[in-house]
Amino acid sequence: MRKLALRTAIGLAALLTAAQGSARELLDYWGQCVPFAREASGIRIFGDAWTWWEQAEGRYARGSKPKVGSVIVFAKTDRLRFGHVAVVSRIVEKRVLMLTHANWSRRDGKRGFAEQDVTLHDVSDGNDWSLVKVWYRDTGGLGGGVYPVKGFIHGGKPADELSGENPDYVGALIDAYVPR
């Protein structure tokens, strides 16, 4: 427990520095997805990621359509015991967007790192973003898992560093639509 508290404190310190600094510093964050999403989106919600959807009711606009700067809330599942939150950094097309988030892929065998402009593909039957696939660094493409989503929370003031200068739109579309 002390190790987790220390890791969280270090991650928050890095995030506070990042909020005042450059995009590179924002991407140097290491820790949980919740503090990262809160600072990167400006949406002031606390607690486990899966609780954000209900907490946003009456405080922030919510919906099923993405907007740049919105937080996407992944539902709690067996694979995502605390859910997951990420910030929409780019909209590529109707069923493909890019996220900036933390604590998803591994780097050097560890989770917790921030990633910018990661592909997210809507795979729901109703084209409503209720089921998604996420780009996964470990495989260099969309992971094999399909994740349920509660929706998008709108209304914060997103960080300027959400998206890179040259996001790979073509790569995102290839990841989403070309079978591996």
Image: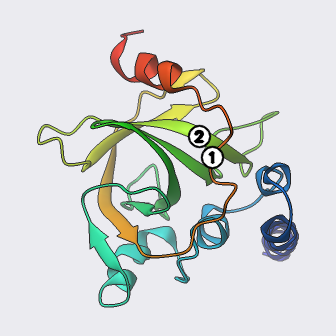
Does 174 sit above or below residue 112? above
Labelled pair 1, 2 in contact (Cβ < 8 Å): yes
Q: Is residue 141 left or right of residue 125?
A: right
Does 38 sit above or below residue 104? below
Q: Residue 117 carries which label?
A: 2
Q: Which mark is residue 138?
A: none
Residue at point 43%, 76% (across, down): 155
Asked where in the image residue 41 lies, by quadrant, the reply is bottom right
Neighbour tally class for label 2: few under 14, some 14-19, many 20 plus, Cα within 10 Å: many
Q: What residue type is labelled 2?
A: Asp
Residue at point 42%, 9% (across, down): 180
x and y, in percent, of residue 53 in the image: 35, 74
Asked where in the image residue 160 lies, by quadrant, the reply is bottom right
Does 87 sit above or below residue 156? above
Which residue is denoted by mark 1 in the rendering? 163
In this rendering, the label closer to the viewer, 1 or 2: 1
x and y, in percent, of residue 148 in the image: 30, 51
Q: Which colour scheme is used?
A: rainbow
Residue at point 61%, 46% (across, down): 104
Residue at point 52%, 32% (across, down): 135
Q: Which amino acid does label 1 sit on?
A: Ser
- The mark tally for this picture is 2
Neighbour tally class for label 1: few under 14, some 14-19, many 20 plus, Cα within 10 Å: many
Q: Which of 30 and 15 is in front in this view?
A: 15
